[in-house]
Amino acid sequence: MKRHLTFPTGPIIDGLDVTTGATFHTLRPASGERFAEVHRAGAAEIDAAVAAARKAFLNWGSRPVRDRMRHLGNLLEAVRRSHDELAALIAAEQGKPVAEARAIDLVPAADALRYYARFTEELLAARPVDYEQILFAHKAGSFQFEPLGVVAVVTPWNFPFAIPMVEVAACLAAGNTVVLKPASATAVTGLAIGELCRRAGLPPGVVNVVPAMGSDTDHLVGHPDVAKVLFTGSVEVGRHVMELCARNVTGCVLELGGKDPAIVCADADLDRAAAGIVWGAFCNAGQACGSIERVYVVPEVAEAFVEKVVERTQAIRMGDPLVESTDMGPMTTAAQRDFVEEQVHEAVAKGAKVLTGGQKPSVKGFWYPPTVLTNVDHSMRVMHEETFGPLLPIQVVPSLDEAIRLANDSVYGLTASGWTRSPKLARRLAEELKAGTVTINDHLFSFGEPAVTWGGIKKSGIGRSHAVYGLMELVNVKHVSVDLQDSTEAPWWYPYDGAFQKFIKRAFGALYTNDPRTKVPDALGLMSSGRFFGYVKVSKIASKLGKMF
């Protein structure tokens, strides 16, 4: 286990390790014992990190895209070479099984790095504008994509490697520099990303890592030299982040969690549905914003479905996260484990039935068993309040209509899934479920696909990550127009004389009416207008005449 501590345990600023006067400890969720002592970054270290990132941006932001892509490829290779060590680190500090650390932390991170290393040049290529206004036919327009500057990335402990690395990869691809603030509970895993960036040869200051806490994190989010903030966490903290950003009119992308529903239709493949929903609920001990946190099943298949779910849940092997055959480890923090326990107790007090699990074991560490509840309804917290733990409530509903209504009856809208064999029902679920992602006969996987977006509606957040739409959050979309016409003035410039009045009236009629009795004479009048004809070349207009009809 000593090798895990070869990773840095203090801020990485401008490529250098920094020690500070204050420290905190991360814990092993499996035992509750200390894992590492970490040097805490304060306001001074954050100022230094932002300054280093700002200085590095002068070079990094102006580099050719292919050069940035090459560095991302090098970073992918650094991850590949260290994947065994990284998986063990994540398992020890965060608590997910080592096999799961590879599957849901390392693979999504590697996929994102590979995606941007291959396609950034294509994704950020200038896009020509075909002007709709015929009077602008001679202009050459384009959209160009420029980096913003320093991006603050504030990430949670549930995916301590995947979430920050995916965000960092996108920032670097776009040409931005980064100050990463990892979750305190998994600070060493976050610092490992900074170390990998050094091993990959990224220039000093391009990626800085500051293990900060409390008000010091506020100092980073509210820093006047930060161009954008990417935050993943709770609604409560996200609202606070948004308020801090508003003070400097700093843009932000917020991913704030979910209460993700699954609907089991009467024609569903129950074996597949049970297997997929159990994994979607208990993967990472249920500590995923996209976890299945409520299930609606129609009466025709409810009994058989619930039986299969309980059977599969009871087969989950809990144990040491460093053992490769372990299916589920402990929860990451004691506070989150206690929160799940509170939800279960409240639901049971209101009439819910525990079919398996539901009892906190009397052992060291932050353990809670995978738990299945029935006899639940929306008066209970387990059906409307984010759980973020290994808890699966199943509600039997009278119809598919009611299932869809209840699935949408939430302040969240991150992901949702439907389970059916019918193409018609699949289309209906895709259209009527209100979420950022809807999947049929699968759930949760899409975070790991770099070519699709991640993000939600309502209180699940603002903006998107992943794919081209996530990349657009990290650039200035600049419209550029070039006019090399040989005329001395444009027809819509001063003076507003009689020639202008004739020109603008004819233009309005020619462009905006569908009545040929008006369009034809006004078009002819426009062509004969000296104000127009002296400015726009006939050859350019001829190529765009289709836009008039």
Image (tube, rainbow, N blue to C red):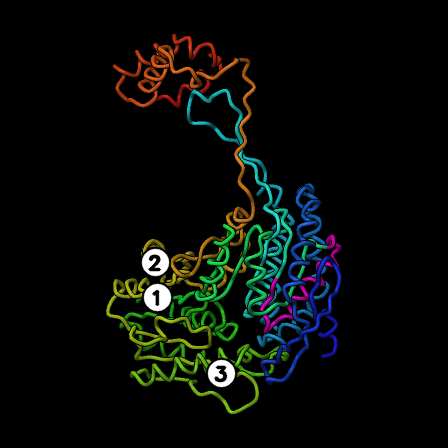
Q: Which of marks 1 and 2 is nearer the N terminus?
A: 1
Q: Quadrant of the N terminus?
A: bottom right
Q: Which residue is drawn at 57% across and 50% down?
A: 227
Q: Percent from the top left, x then y, of residue 468?
A: 53, 47
Asked whether disc 1 touches disc 2, contact meaning CB atoms under 8 Å apart, the reply is yes
Viewed as shown, does residue 110 lie left or right of 387? right
Residue 433 is tagged as 2
Q: Compared with residue 385, is residue 224 higher up or lower down, i.e. above or below?
A: above
Element type at mark 3? loop
Magenta stretch, overall SS? helix
| Residue at position x 34%, y 67% in the image | 264
Q: Which amino acid does label 2 sit on?
A: Leu
Real-space CA distance between mark 3 and mark 1, rounded to the nearest whole angstrom: 25 Å
- CA separation, marks 3 and 2? 31 Å
For label 2, the SS is: loop
Q: Is residue 197 magenta?
A: yes
- Which is more N-terminal, label 2 or label 3? 3
Coordinates of residue 151 in the picture (x, y in percent): 59, 53
Amino acid carrying label 3: it is Tyr
What percent of the width, then of the height, locates residue 230?
54, 57
**In this rendering, which labeled residue sits more in front, label 3 or label 1?**
3
Q: Is residue 442 one of those drawn in magenta?
A: no
Above or below, 56 against 343 in this view is above
User: Contact (CB < 8 A) between labels 3 and 1?
Assistant: no
Binning the other alpha carbons within 10 Å of mark 1 as few (below 14), some (14 to 19) or many (20 upward) gives many
